[in-house]
Structures are given as structure tokens and as C-alpha cells.
Amino acid sequence: MLTSPSEWHIQQAHCTLTRLRPSLEAAIGKGRDAERFFQRLSHKMPLIFTLLHELYGDQYDFFYHLQNILVSAAQLSRQRSADLKKLDEQRRAAPHWFQSEQMLGAIAYVDLFAGDLNGIKDKLPYFKELGVTYLHLMPLFKAPQSNSDGGYAVSDFRSVNPSLGTMAQLAALAADMRANGISLVLDFVFNHTSDEHEWAQKALNGDLEHQAFYLMYPDRTLPDQYQRTLRDIFPEQAPGAFTYRPEMEKWVWTTFNTFQWDLNYSNPSVFQAMLEEMLFLANQGVEVLRLDAVAFVWKQMGTPCENLPQAHTIIRAFNALASVVAPSMIFKSEAIVHPDDVASYISPQECPISYNPTMMALTWEALATRDVRLLSYAMEHRFALPQGCAWVNYVRSHDDIGWSFADEDAWALGITPFPHRQFLNAFYTGQFEGSFAAGVPFNFNPVTLDMRICGMAASLAGLEAAQAQGNVPYQQLAIKRLLMIHSLIISAGGIPLLYLGDDIAMTNDYSYKDDPAKDNDARWVHRPRFDWARAAQRSDTSTPEGQMYQGLSHLIHLRKATPAFGTGHTAFFDSGNRHVLAYVCDGQVLALANFSEAAQIVSAAVIASHLNATPSYDRVTDALLPAGDVSLAPYQYVWLTKTPEKAIKSRKRIK
Ligand code: GLC
Ligand code: GLC
């Protein structure tokens, strides 16, 4: 894989820039903004040249493509609004703006949460009430009418789905959000387009130039050879990675659903076209771009075609060009793969922020086993990130839960991975005796016996089953589980990301089974229409909605008042009690979380050895601790510090 630019690259980059300067000047015009563009470009040019040369340097027309790519960048820089250029300057002064205790993320589907973009605008007070500073609006682009993989089959990156609004409305909303301290997060679904995208349509009509935008084969010879080393992503609803299209008499590469055509990044025209789509989105006011399915963008025979070195090169090249045109925008990686591979995308040059799927999946693992060792071990070894990077910590997302922890981590603790994953699937589908969970199986693979899990957090944590039984104590336990796992994402270093609906403990929605466009994809069970009637009860703590919302609000409030949660330095350690997760945030706050429904004790000696000051105060309950060992009630979590002045005065004591 690529290292840093060599002497030769630096010289060639310089020479190229000199040659191209007149065309770039023609594209960008004159003035201060143009000067700034050239400053940034000269600075990044050696890197841009190196990356693109590595990807496309062996093609005879490399210089032609390089020129087109840079001219596109100049044109899109010229189109960037004054407002966003101001933001670019602000963020240059504070590049680590997202590493802050003030950050709180949320995910919403525009239609399911608020009907359309106007509805989202009307709901800004709700986001502000929660404390949201980062709002991921799920793919809202033009997409096929029936099944569009929840919007992840994009037919036009420059059009908003007409039922939701227009691109102009989206740009205005982004500005409104920004004025309210909320950053817009959108997807860049760059691995594939829908088969209704103009490029795919042209390809279907026999246009060879656009057929070369995708990966297509006249017969099964190559697909069969590739298929041997590929993982099946949707073995039930879309087995295999190739789809035959009789219109062209060709097999198209379709990693995900049959209507999602993988783009061919070995073609520099694809890189250029997608760069233009990306910068167009940046210019609408996107502040965080979620790079969808990063692992899959490069293919090579004889490999799994996931996480190949060129995937990194492509992202780095996009990053370098975005930092010239839209320097305030950052990339977020969506790689739901082996933890080592997840980490490989995270760096300031690639994606400075990333989902933390390992922590997410292992949190559910620990809830099922009541044993935090695997979670703790994995986080002790894997939580630290390079300078300037942050995790996005979450409990649930719109996707399934896959047990993508590292086998090595499990073996290190004497856990055999295969039966353990089988156990977790049995537990979360409620088949394991005594399980509290009501999850739904997702894409069982009869060859590998692999399976994933769908379900709303509340259903997975036991609320659905307890409500069905009318069992009030069990309902209470479920809410405690939910709050406890949210306490982890809210305090562990990084950006906490709420899946809206979880804020009011919404349970599974089985109505997808009645919709033929959804019934083969169980992920819809956890994509309910947001229930505003239930949200209206969020202040009433006699309801589960109120208990969840108020508990969550309290934690968010505390987060924002605790700078130690903003730095990202989180040291997980062995609490000496396998039911209790323990970590120290920035050397200041020691967190304990009891993952079992029995009371637990953590010894004073263990705590003393992990925090300089003797902790004597719990921020969660705002109470002083008795001296000695710390006792935790079922599913209790505490955030311990030394005693603040105001608490000494009020002299409260924990019972
Ligand atoms: C990402 C999305 C998922 C989608 C897939 C294909 O993983 O999160 O919902 O199915 O990409 O676009
Ligand atoms: C696979 C992919 C992930 C995607 C998911 C959708 O796990 O690795 O990117 O979100 O499938 O189900």
C-alpha cells in the first residue's frame, strides 16, 4: 500500500500543477477565494497526485483524467457558498470540533420521523430539547419507488426524493440546522447506484461508456471465479454477487441487492463522476459525510473483495480533494467488518470518525451473558484511536447486528467463537431459555450458519416481552438495561449516536410483513414510524417512554457538563468483577456499569489503582459515596469523581 509521496511524486505534482494552472484559473476565476483554493491545492497536490497515480497511473490517458478531476474540483470550489466558505475558515481554526462533550448525534428517517423535509424543520425544537448537535438524515435521494434498500439504492445523487422535498429545501434546512448548532450528516452511497440511475439506464441501453461505469460480464466465467472468495451479504434476499440483465445479456456485479449495481472504481471516469456528486453534496451544507459500505469499493480476483488496499487509496484521494474544496466537511466510515479492518479506515487522512460496531455488538453480547470480559478486553485493546479521530458510539442503527467481534479476542478469553455466536443468535431471537429478548433473525446463511439480528433496542433489551406479559418488574429491568447501555455510549470517548425511537423506548414494528416491498428484509422491524403520541408522554415518568426519555436526558445533560467525556481518552480496565464494566475517562471520571440483574461489588482497591484522586462522588445520582467498596444495584451505572464543592455543601449520602 501507499506510503508518502516520493521526490519523484513531488516533482511531478509540481510540474502538473504548473501546466494545469491556466485551465484551473479559467474554472475558478480570480480573487481571494481562488487564492485560497490554490494555496490548499498546492499543499495537497503531492498527495493527490500520488494517490491518483497509484490508482490510475498505468492508464495511457492518466493526465487527461487528472486534469478533468482537478478542473471539476475547481468548478465545485467556485460554486461553494460564502456561508460555507466561512464555515471552512472556522473549522480550520478548530479542526477537532467534533471531539467535544457537547456533541450528541441522532439518526432519523425523514419520512418516518417527520413526513418530509419541512417536517424535519418543524421538529428542530425536539432535537434541541434532546441536545442533538449532529443529525444523520437517512438516505433521502431519488430512489426506486418500491424497494430501494431503505434509500441506499440511489437513482440521482443530486435530487431529493420528491415525496420528501427538494435539494434547495435540503440546503436551506442545512443552513437552519447550522444556525441551531446542528451539523447535517448525509450518506455518500458511493459503492453502488440503483439500476434506475441515469448511468445504469444508459448501460442497459447498450452505451459502452456507461457499461464501463459498472462491472459486467458476458457470461458466468469470471463471476464464478470471483464468487469463490466472496462473502454473501444478503444470502436470503439476494444470494450471490452477480445479477443477470437480459437487456444487455450481461451479468452485473451487485454486492447487495440485485438492483444495487457496484461502481467500477478502476475506471477513472467513475472516480471523477463520483467526486463531482460528493462535492455537490458538500456544497449543500453537509458537514459529516457518512461513507457507506467503504469496505467493498475495490475488487480483485482471488480475494474477498473487501478492505483491499485500493479502497483506502480511493477514500484518501476523495478526502484530499474534499479538503481542498470543502475543508470543513469530514468523513465518517461505515465499515461493519473485523475490528482490525474497522480501525484501518480511521485516520485524519481517511475517515476521522467511524462507527464503533465492535463496542455496539459486544455491548449486546455482554447483556446476554451478563459477563463483560469480552467487551472489556476488546475495548482495552481496540478503543484507542489516532490523534484527531473519534468513535461514533451507538446502541442501535438502521441495520442488523452482526457478531463481528474478533475471534482472536474471544479465544484469548477461552471463548469458542462459533458456538458463542450461535448462542447470541438463539438468545436474541428469544429461543434461548430465559432470554428477555424479542429479536428477529436476519439473513441466515445455510452454508456458514451465520446469522444476524434485527430489532429495536427496547425489544432486544426485554421491554416488548415484559409488556406482553404485563410484568412490571421486568419492564423496569428492561428500561434499566436500556439506560445502562446508553450511559456507555454517552460517556465513552467519542460522539454518542442515538437511534431516534430509542429515546422513547419504541419496540418492534412488525407491519413491514404486510408490505411486499419490505417483507423480505427484517431490518424494517426496527425502522418504525416515530410515535409522536408516545413522545408526548416523555415527561411522565410513570410511563416507559417518560422513564427512558428522562433518564436519557439526564445522562445527556451530565455529559455536556463533563469535559472529561469530550477528549476521547477512555481507558477500559478489568474491574475484578466479570459483571461490571469499568473505564476511566480522561483520568478524571471512573465509570462502572453493572451488566447483571444482581447487585455487584467492585473493590475499593481496584478503583483506587485506576484513579489518582479517591472517588467519593457519583455524578449520575449526585450523591456522595460511602467509604470502601462500591456496591452497585442491578444494572446500575455510576460516574465517579472526587467530590465537587457543591456536593460537599449539600452533604448528600448514597444509601
Ligand atoms: C450500508 C447501509 C445498509 C445498506 C448497505 C448497502 O451498509 O447501512 O443499510 O443495505 O450499505 O448500501
Ligand atoms: C454487511 C455489511 C455492512 C452492511 C450490512 C447490511 O454487514 O458489511 O456494511 O451494513 O451488511 O446488512
Image: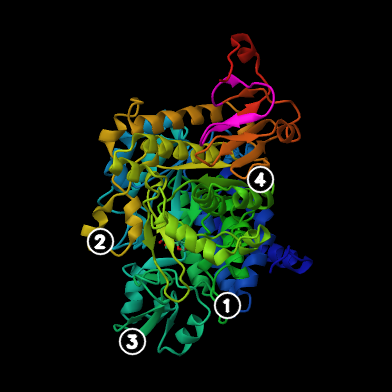
For the C terminus, the quadrant is top right
Three-letter code for the amino acid on which mark 2 is drawn: Gln
The residue sitting at 62% across, 60% down in the picture is: 410
The residue sitting at 61% across, 65% down in the picture is: 313
Q: Which residue is mark 1?
A: 303
Q: Which residue is mark 3?
A: 249
Q: Which secondary structure is most common in the magenta stretch?
A: loop
Which quadrant of the structure image shows residue 143?
A: bottom left
Q: Earlier in the sequence, mark 4 or mark 1?
A: 1
Task: Single out the mark in the foreground, 3 or 1.
Answer: 1
Q: Earlier in the sequence, mark 4 or mark 2?
A: 2
Q: Secondary structure at mark 4?
A: loop
Where residue 628 appears, as percent x and y from the top left, is 69, 25
Three-letter code for the amino acid on which mark 3 is drawn: Glu
Three-letter code for the amino acid on which mark 1 is drawn: Thr
Q: Which residues are magenta?
A: 620-638
Where residue 625 appears, as percent x and y from the top left, is 63, 22
Q: Residues within 10 Å of mark 4 (few under 14, many from 20)?
A: some
Q: Secondary structure at mark 1?
A: loop
Cα–Cα span, label 4 and label 2? 41 Å
Q: Which residue is mark 2?
A: 145
Q: Earlier in the sequence, mark 4 or mark 3?
A: 3
Give the answer, above or below, for where 275 lies relative to 348.
below
Where residue 188 appears, as percent x and y from the top left, is 45, 57
Q: Which residue is mark 4?
A: 388
Q: Residues within 10 Å of mark 1 (few under 14, many from 20)?
A: some
Q: Which color scheme does this rendered protein use?
A: rainbow
Where residue 322 appears, as percent x and y from the top left, is 56, 54
Task: Single out the mark in the foreground, 2 or 1.
Answer: 1
Q: Secondary structure at mark 3?
A: loop
